[in-house]
Image: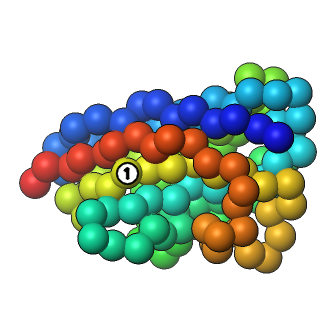
Amino acid sequence: QVQLVESGGGLVQAGGSLRLSCAASGRTFSSYGMGWFRQAPGKEREFVAAISQSGSTTYYTNSVKGRFTTSRDNAKNTVYLQMNSLKPEDTALYYCAGKESLGKMYGDYTSYPYWGQGTQVTVSS
């Protein structure tokens, strides 16, 4: 089992950058595939990015490709989401999530058993 805590959210102007971090407890972090999801008020939770256990494979939703980058440091039990060129439509509560095998269902939030509490990202126009 793994416990996740996000940080790094905040208020930023359009075009700005933020770096989210997700710190994990436990000694088996490197065995978990990790995902990033976001949820805006009144909308469904949506997939943003995912990264494999080793960090060698990443996936992104089309709307963030070229702007967001996810990475991980298994020695620090931390996964990151670097967000550049932020847009007002990126405003949401951002969550990190983990599961033991990333697999083909990396974009399906219901397949992740472990979740952080979320961190708010607000992008002003």
Residue drawn at x 72%, y 56% is 113
- The amino acid type found where label 1 is placed reads Leu
**22 is higher (above) or lower (below) than 111:** above
Estimate the x, y position of residue 13 in percent, counting from the top left: 17, 43
For mark 1, what is the residue? 93
- Secondary-structure class at tag 1: strand
Which of the two residues, 30 or 55, is positioned nearer the viewer here? 30
Which of the two residues, 41 or 52, is positioned nearer the viewer here? 41
**91 is higher (above) or lower (below) than 83:** below
Residue drawn at x 20%, y 59% is 88
Residue drawn at x 22%, y 40% is 12
Q: Is 31 left or right of 55, judged from the image as shown? A: right
Residue drawn at x 31%, y 45% is 121
Residue 18 visible, this orientation = no
Estimate the x, y position of residue 26 in percent, counting from the top left: 82, 28
Estimate the x, y position of residue 68 in percent, counting from the top left: 48, 54
The colour style of the image is rainbow
Picture quarter with the N terminus: top right
Q: Is 47 left or right of 24, judged from the image as shown? A: left
